[in-house]
C-alpha cells in the first residue's frame, strides 16, 4: 500500500515516520529547506529519550511519486486551501505539480 503525506512538517513527519516504522510504503511532500533536510538526513523524531530516524522518498513534485493508494493532508489550518489549489487530479493529467508553483494558482 502506497501512502503519501502531503505536508511533512511536525505532524506529517511524525505520521509518515510511524507509518514507515509500521511497514507502509510512505513518501512525503515538502518544500524548501525542510525538503532538503529530509532528503539528506531523513525524518527524525525525538520522544523522551528515544530518537527515531527513517529515510523515505520526499519531493516537492507529487507527480514524481506516481499513483498513491492514500494521501494524508497534514497542513496547518491557514494552508487548508493549498490542496484545493493543487488539484491533485492535474498531476495525473499532466499539470505542473510543483509545490513551489501552487501559491500562484488561484481557486478553481
Image (spheres, grey):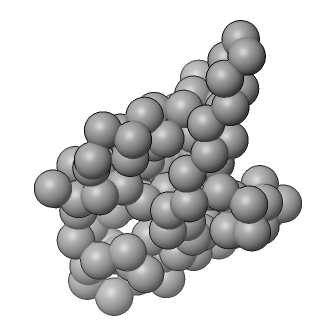
Left or right of 91? Residue 77 is right
Which residue ends up furthest to the front in the rendered image?
A: 49
Instruction: Pinpoint residue 98: horizontal percent, then vertical percent.
Output: 57, 74
Which of the image's four quarters has the C terminus? bottom left
User: Which residue sits at x=68%, y=41%?
Assistant: 44
Which residue ends up furthest to the bottom in the rendered image?
A: 94
Residue 68 placement: quadrant: bottom left
Total marks shown come to 0
Q: Is residue 11 above or below residue 3?
A: above
The answer to whether one can see residue 59 in this image is yes
Left or right of 4? Residue 36 is right
The answer to whether one can see residue 73 in this image is no
Instruction: Pinpoint residue 47: horizontal percent, then vertical percent.
Output: 67, 17
User: Which residue sits at x=68%, y=68%?
Assistant: 39
Instruction: Pinpoint residue 43: horizontal percent, then vertical percent.
Output: 64, 48
Q: Is residue 15 above or below residue 68?
A: above
User: Which residue sits at x=65%, y=57%?
Assistant: 42
Residue 26 placement: quadrant: bottom left
Q: Is residue 63 above or below residue 16?
A: below
Q: Is residue 46 above or below residue 98?
A: above
Left or right of 49? Residue 56 is left
- 70 vs 40, nearest the viewer: 40
Which residue ends up furthest to the top in the rendered image?
A: 48
Instruction: Pinpoint residue 28: horizontal percent, then vertical percent.
Output: 49, 56
Which of the image's four quarters has the N terminus? bottom left
User: Which residue sits at x=30%, y=38%?
Assistant: 22
Amino acid at each position: 500500500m502506497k501512502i503519501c503525506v502531503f505536508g511533512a512538517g511536525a505532524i506529517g513527519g511524525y505520521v509518515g515516520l510511524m507509518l514507515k516504522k509500521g511497514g507502509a510504503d510512505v513518501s512525503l511532500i515538502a518544500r524548501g529547506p525542510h525538503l532538503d533536510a529530509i532528503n539528506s538526513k531523513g525524518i527524525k523524531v525525538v520522544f523522551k529519550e528515544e530518537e527515531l530516524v527513517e529515510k523515505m522518498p520526499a519531493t516537492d513534485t507529487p507527480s514524481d511519486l506516481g499513483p498513491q493508494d492514500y494521501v494524508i493532508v497534514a497542513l496547518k489550518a491557514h494552508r487548508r486551501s493549498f490542496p484545493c489549489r493543487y488539484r491533485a487530479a492535474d498531476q495525473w493529467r499532466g499539470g505542473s505539480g510543483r509545490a513551489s508553483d501552487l501559491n500562484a494558482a488561484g481557486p478553481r
